[in-house]
Image (cartoon, rainbow, N blue to C red):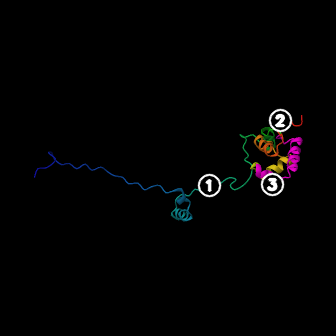
């Protein structure tokens, strides 16, 4: 039977090194592993966390201390515009002339009753879409110059 290799057969053995995988940090924190390391005399490192689980301000000199009130004053715009008195009075008069409740008006304009209540109390921020729906249902002009 002919050999496949024409020359002398040589064995090429390389060394293979197997390493254990490093232990996971969770396994190192396990109390059993810590006690085992202490019994065997292996070095054990303990670190105390500074200000852990406290709600104190960070006392860093790199960050300037800015009060929350100053931030709010700088970032907040002026008070939002509310529904003018003549508009909410016109809404209320027109609704009462049509003998509708706030809930009925809200249902017809497809808005929650709370919206109609806020508009009639003058607490709502005017929304042109809501005012347009109210104009259509009540038949009263609510946007633009009223009564002029």
Q: Range of the magenta residues?
A: 79-108
Q: Which mark is residue 47?
A: 1
Q: Main secondary structure of the magenta part?
A: helix
Q: Point out residue 74 in the picture as x, y percentages from the top left corner.
A: 79, 38
Label 3, on which residue? 103
Of tags 1 and 3, the one toward the viewer is 3
| The stretch drawn in magenta includes residue 133 | no
The residue closer to the viewer here, 129 or 21, is 129
Labels 2 and 3: the sequence-earlier one: 3
Q: Point out residue 108 in the picture as x, y percentages from the top left corner.
A: 76, 50
Q: Residue at x 80, y 51 (%)?
A: 105
Q: Which mark is residue 144?
A: 2
Q: Point out residue 61 in the picture as x, y percentages from the top left corner.
A: 73, 41
Near mark 2 (Cα within 10 A), the count class, few <14, some 14-19 or many ≥20, is few
The residue closer to the viewer here, 99 or 57, is 99
Q: CA distance from mark 1 to mark 2?
A: 69 Å
Q: Is residue 60 among what the camera can see? A: yes
Q: Contact, CB < 8 Å: mark 1 with mark 2? A: no
Q: CA distance from mark 1 to mark 3?
A: 64 Å
| The stretch drawn in magenta includes residue 91 | yes
Say which element carries label 3: helix
Q: Quadrant of the C terminus?
A: top right
Q: Residue at x 54, y 58 (%)?
A: 26
Q: Point out residue 70 in the picture as x, y percentages from the top left corner.
A: 81, 40
Does residue 14 appear to the left or right of 71 in the view shown? Answer: left
């Amino acid at each position: 039977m002919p050999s496949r290799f024409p020359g002398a057969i040589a064995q090429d053995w390389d060394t293979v090194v197997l390493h254990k995988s490093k232990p996971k940090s969770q396994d190192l924190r396990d109390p059993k592993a810590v006690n085992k390391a202490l019994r065997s005399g292996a070095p054990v490192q303990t670190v105390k966390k500074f200000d852990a689980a406290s709600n104190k301000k960070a006392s860093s000199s790199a960050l300037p201390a800015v009060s929350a009130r100053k931030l709010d004053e700088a970032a907040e715009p002026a008070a939002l515009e509310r529904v003018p008195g003549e508009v909410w009075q016109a809404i209320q008069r027109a609704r009462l002339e049509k003998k509708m409740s706030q809930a009925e008006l809200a249902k017809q304009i497809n808005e929650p009753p709370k919206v109609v209540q806020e508009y009639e109390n003058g607490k709502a921020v005017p929304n042109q879409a809501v005012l347009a729906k109210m104009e259509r249902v009540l038949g009263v002009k609510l946007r633009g110059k009223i009564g002029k």
